[in-house]
Amino acid sequence: MATTFTMRVFRGGPDGGDFKEYQVEGGEGMVVLDVIHRLQATQANDLACRWNCKAGKCGSCSAEINGKPRLMCMTRMDIFKEGEAISVAPIRTFPLIRDLVTDVSYNYEKAKQVPPLRLKPPDADGKYRMMQADVDRGQEFHKCIECFLCQDVCHVIRDHDLKKSFAGPRFFIKIAGLEMHPLDTRDRTQFVREQAGIGLCNITKCCTEVCPEHIHITDNGIIPMKERMADNFDPIVWLVRKIRGYKKAAP
Amino acid sequence: MATADYETHEHDVLVIGAGGAGLRAAIEAAAQGASVGLVCKSLLGKAHTVMAEGGIAAAMGNVYPEDNWQVHFRDTMRGGKMLNNWRMAQLHAQEAPDRVLELERYGALFDRTKDGRILQRDFGGHRYARLAHVGDRTGLEMIRTLQYHGIHQGIDVYMECKIERLLKDGDRIGGAFGYWRNTGKFVLFKAKAIVLATGGIGKAWKITSNSWEYTGDGQSLALWAGADLIDMEFVQFHPTGMVWPPSVRGILVTESVRGDGGTLKNSKGERFMFNYIPEFFKGETADNEEEADRWYADKRNNRRTADLLPRDEVARAINAEVKAGRGSPHGGVFLDIASRRPVDYIRKRLPSMYHQFKELAGVDITKEPMEVGPTCHYVMGGVRVDADSTAATVPGLFAAGEAAGGLHGSNRLGGNSLSDLLVFGRRAGLHAALYAKNLGGQISVDSSLVESIVRDVLAPFTRSGSENPYAVQADLQETMQNLVGIIRVEAELKEALKQIEAFRLRAARVRVEGGRTYNPAWHTALDLNSLLTVAECCAMSALERKESRGGHTRDDHPYTDDQWGTVNLVLRHRNGSLELRREPLPPMPPELKALFQERR
């Protein structure tokens, strides 16, 4: 099968750049990342891109493919029309380093601000027990591969550049995961309102749509947390919840 | 350039590598009060650990109360064909349960038993269901948990930083020198102790489950600094990698598929593994399908299915079936769970495999079999370390995880890697911190060496050659795949060494275009140094070991030889060349030896 792909790849750095067109030899079952690698090996040796696992598990190769935020390693070439020019651009919410690589350090800064787990004491025998039903939702949030596509597409960060006062969807599910952790005892109400800025989210669900792990970021993470933040003004409700655990939202 | 321009950071302990072992080491060293730097070649949380699927082997006895560290120790030693460092295997089996519980206290959410404890699953070579897991994404849970615990421990994290050389203070470790991948600028770390936790060497092969990062950096850094490597001939080819389409060839298919009931079949539909049970494992392996299938539910009265023999055995069997013309259409064999387990069970237990096959191969694993074949996965050999302290043979240097050798002998059991990372990562961090504390004083490093490192590192931009770094890497991978693969033979190993020599000459003529800002051509060119070093170490040791054992199979010496079972091959750099020696295994104490006398 001797196909040729027409690729329009962003080349450049913080001082400017543009899409450059390349013709790349195709092959069966190729994904966008394969084409980028072939391009690197043959025509554009210094083309910058991040990648690691090539199997949708590490979340390194995020890009905007034909304008849509996706993982390059999980985007098959055969979803595009034959002969269609395919554009590959960096995730543009973050400062560009070069070509397809951006500076995502904002996310690592936000990660550090999230108040960590504070364990309750173990059972009388010194052990902890958790039921599967009580960890299901947390496990859903733990599927996050930190590709930051949700952060890229979130308009609070992307269009309004409210990075300082907003943690973004990735960290809302991080916080939700801690809040719903059966062993956690910490109160994050103030943090979520004031530093994480959950009020800025107006639940357009763009984050959920681009999540390659299909995590229900909005329905299972953000909305329940917004509701809880309202309830948590009542310290008795908060305490009861911490002791009895959260009831799970819809699957 | 007259004086190289670089920034300097100083730490008691510098950990190189931020997968499971590196993160656990950094956390422990920080807990000891040491000032800790953690260097990652990629972004934090993207290291190879993230790809681990099946689980963490630990004899917690949550599913089978009769499981204990002695059984785990015995399984590990037998899986490694008794070439393992017994003390490492003992510590590993004894400490793994505590390390798993500790991970839970850091926030990990493992799958649960009905009474709320950590669920454990079956895996190859383990007598009991022993792997603590989260579906088939245990590595992700582990790295994320360590990462989010680690960022609150006062550790300085240096992301996208590549270490080129270790620096010495006299005979001891004094620091490390490298560059930032995103700017190309140089950085010098002064450190009293260094922990190498850089992972493996799998990028030297063409069909591999390993990412671009796995270029043998730690093994090479150690060797160049004067430390010993052992067991470098032992490379694990995981029996089940994807084989189709070509672009995904080598991507891992977790052993959990077989642990959860999947079976291997050839083109005639035969469950062929029953024809490949070696004498060594006959006592504990079911020789018929009925017993094998009963074993999943009743381990007390049945022997383990042949599908879950250790990985070296299964990889060789698949190789033989394909050679005999009984392979699948694309040169693998079939792995079938669709006809053996309900759809819901498969999707709950193996969500990431379902996703991976659906998206990348267009195969629904709940409806049809997968096509699988061996893929380079893991190196058992590595930096030679003291079992208790993980100290390498250079003072101040420590190694843990895949970068270290010894624990797994000639073949690693599935699940023993994640437990290795936790057990020896912690030990490395602890002992590196103690060493640094005892050493006290100031570190001074030889900065004249820095000038020459800088010259070497920048040479690809200015030299007159015209070699393409990607082409040299691809040709090396082809050579290792064809000549130093699953089945080896003297003439081919000699040929491989000759070709590696030729690749060295080509690597010295590599020329890269563009600047120093995030330039993958330059990074690939520099990684060739370590990749060629570990390729040579592997081929040299493989040529020397004239027997077949674990992850080293010689067609011209097809049997396991008791004489060879008493020695490790040790490599060191002396006067600019590699020196290879046979050294006796440390003797196992009688009380541990007795564990191998029992029935199965």
Image (cartoon, coloured by chain):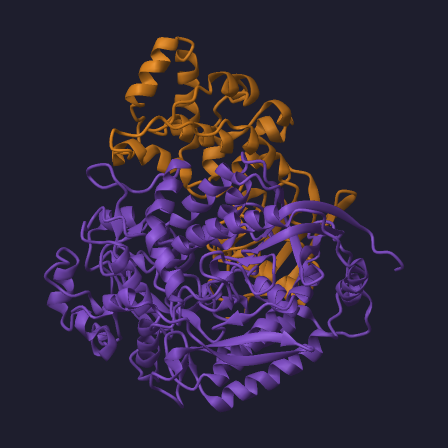
- Residue B276 visible from this viewpoint: no
Residue B216 versus residue A123 in the image, above or below: below
**Residue A114 location in percent, x, y?**
52, 28
Along the viewing direction, whichever of B408 and B470 lies nearer the viewer: B408
User: As drawn, is A202 to the left or to the right of A248?
Assistant: right
**Residue B198 location in percent, x, y?**
55, 58
Residue B241 versus residue B466 in the image, above or below: above
Quarter of the rendering occupied by the N terminus of chain B: bottom right
User: As drawn, is B570 to the left or to the right of B94?
Assistant: right
Quadrant housing residue B104: top left
User: As drawn, is B142 to the left or to the right of A93?
Assistant: left
Q: Which chain is purple?
A: B
**Residue B294 location in percent, x, y?**
12, 61
Chain A color in figure: orange
**Residue B153 location in percent, x, y?**
54, 36
Residue A75 versus residue A113 in the image, above or below: below
The residue located at (27%, 34%) in the rendering is A129
